[in-house]
Image (spheres, rainbow, N blue to C red):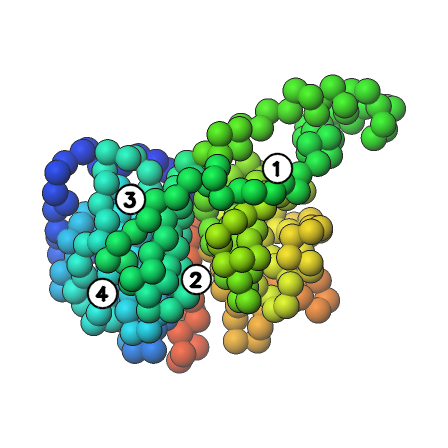
Amino acid sequence: MAACLIVSVLAAPPHELPRPAVHAPLAAESLILHVIQTPRNLVAVGEHGHVLLSEDGRDWTQAEFVPVQATLTRVTYADERLWAVGHDSTIIHSYDFGQTWALQHFEPDWEQPLLDVHFFDGDTGIAVGAYGLFMRTEDAGRHWEILDMADMVTAEAIDWEEAARAMVEEQGEEPDGGPEDDEYYDASLDFDRGCYEFMECHLNAFLDLGAGRQMIAAERGYGFRSVDGGQTWESFRFPYSGSMFGLLHLGGDTVLAYGLRGHVQRSDDFGDSWTVLDTGLESTLMGGIIDPQNRPLMVGTGAARLHYDPESGGFDLDEDRLGSDYVSVLIAPNGTLVLAGADGLSHE
C-alpha cells in the first residue's frame, strides 16, 4: 500500500487555478510524505497541500498559507529558501522558512506528480517525477525547463542478457544449462523493457554526489547517472528488478539504494557494479537518512526501521507489521526521532 503513496499518479480533478490548502486541526495526523531540517526549523509536507512546521519535532503548526491542495511529496532547502513538489506537477516555494508559499508551477492536466526535488544552490535546481518527467531551473524556479529523458540519455550500461538472467532467476526458473543456456538468450530477446522502451519510467529519487555526479533511482530496476551535472545521462540496471524509492550517499563513490520488498543494494563505484544486501526484511523501504553516527537509517511499511552499519555490513531491524507505514524519517538537533507516514507525524 505504501509504495503507492510515492508513485501514485492519481491527480485531483482538472481545474484552471489551484485552491489554497485549508487549515485542518488534524493535519499532523494526515498522510505526511517528507520531513526535513532547515537551519531554523523542521518542515513536513503531505496530502491536501499540508505543510507543517516545528522547532523540536514534537509540536507542529500548519503553515499560514499554501497555494495548493495538491499532495506534496518532497521538500528541499537551499540558501534560506524552500521548494516543495507534488501532484499536479506542482512546485511551490517559500522565503520565510515555510510560513507562506508561492506557486511556481502547476499543470493538473499532465497527471504527472513530481516525486523529488533538489537545489544545488539558491538558483539551480532539478525536479523529477512520474513517466520520466524531468524539470530544471537556473533562476530559483521563476522559470522551469521541461526536458526529455530520451534526449538526455546518451549512453547505456545495460547488459540485456544479464537482465533477462536475473529476471529468470528471480522467478525461480533457472535453466539447467546455466548462464550459457539458450533459454537465457531467448529470454534476453523477449525481455520486457517496460517503461524504459519510451523513457517513461517513474523517476523516484534524485541524489547529488558532488563534483557533477548525480544519480536517479527509477522504477522496475532502472537507474540513471550523470558525470556532467545532469546535462547527459547514462542508464543502468540494479541487480534487483523492482523499483528503488531512495538513494543515500555514504561518501566517495559509495551509494546505497533501497526500495521495494526490503531490497537494499550497495555500489562502491558510482553504479558500475552493485551488491544486493541481505536485510532480512520484506517490507518496502520508502525513506532514509544518514544518522549522526554516519549510519544509514531507512524506514518503510509495517513500521519498519532499518539501520545499516557500512563498516560491518550488518543490519539492525525493528518492525511491527501491524504498525504505521513510514515514508520519511528525521533526527532533530535535540535528538528527537521524527517519523512521517500514513498516520501523520510521530516522535520518539
First reached walking from the N terminus: tag 3 or tag 4: 3
Which residue is rendered at x = 85% and y = 27% of the image? 180
Residue type of the residue flagged with mark 3:
Ser
Q: Measured from the top left, where is residue 199 in percent x and y? A: 49, 34
First reached walking from the N terminus: tag 1 or tag 2: 1
Mark 4 closeness class: few <14, some 14–19, many ≥20 residues within 10 Å: some
Which residue is rendered at x = 61% and y = 42% of the image? 155
**Front position among marks 1 and 2:** 1
Which residue is rendered at x = 53% and y = 66% of the image? 210
The quadrant the C terminus occupies is bottom left
Mark 1 closeness class: few <14, some 14–19, many ≥20 residues within 10 Å: some
Question: How many marks overall?
Answer: 4
Residue ID for mark 2: 329
Q: Nearer the viewer, residue 76 or 290?
A: 76
Residue ID for mark 4: 94
- CA–CA distance in space, label 1 to label 4: 38 Å
Residue type of the residue flagged with mark 2:
Val
- CA–CA distance in space, label 2 to label 4: 22 Å
Which residue is rendered at x = 29% and y = 44% of the image? 89
Q: Nearer the viewer, residue 152 or 279?
A: 152
Helix, strand or loop at label 3? It is loop
Helix, strand or loop at label 4? It is strand
